[in-house]
Image (tube, helix red, strand yellow):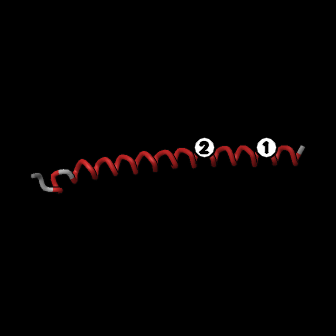
Amino acid sequence: MQHWSDFFPYVFMAIKLIALFIAGYYAIKWHFDQDRKLKKEEEAKKENNA
């Protein structure tokens, strides 16, 4: 019988990769959302000035 610590690196690495993928997804999404928000604000300023 193997000890639980033999599996720990594999389980920990899997959890770590899943967390990094989720964090990366939300980081990219946040940047795209910020860019979209800035473009909307610029368009609104142009419409108000015109």
Position of residue 32 in the picture relative to residue 37 (left or right): left
The residue type indicated by label 2 comes to Phe
Query: Which of 10 and 25 lies nearest the eye of the viewer?
Result: 10
Q: Tag 2: Cα neighbours inside 10 Å, few (<14), some, or many (≥20)?
A: few
Identified by mark 1, the residue type is Glu
Residue 26: image location, x then y, percent: 52, 49
Given this view, does label 1 or label 2 mark the residue nearer the observer? 2
The residue sitting at 81% across, 47% down in the picture is 44
Q: Nearer the viewer, residue 17 or 11?
A: 11
Q: Which residue is mark 2?
A: 32
Q: Are marks 1 and 2 in contact (CB under 8 Å)?
A: no
Query: Residue 2 in the image: x percent, y percent?
Result: 11, 52
- How far apart, in angstroms, are the residues tagged by discs 1 and 2? 17 Å
Q: Which residue is mark 1?
A: 43
**Residue name at image x 38 percent, y 47 percent:** 18
Kindly identify the residue that appears in the image at 46 percent across and 46 percent down.
24
Left or right, 31 with reference to 22: right
Horizontal side of 33 relative to 2 (left or right) equals right
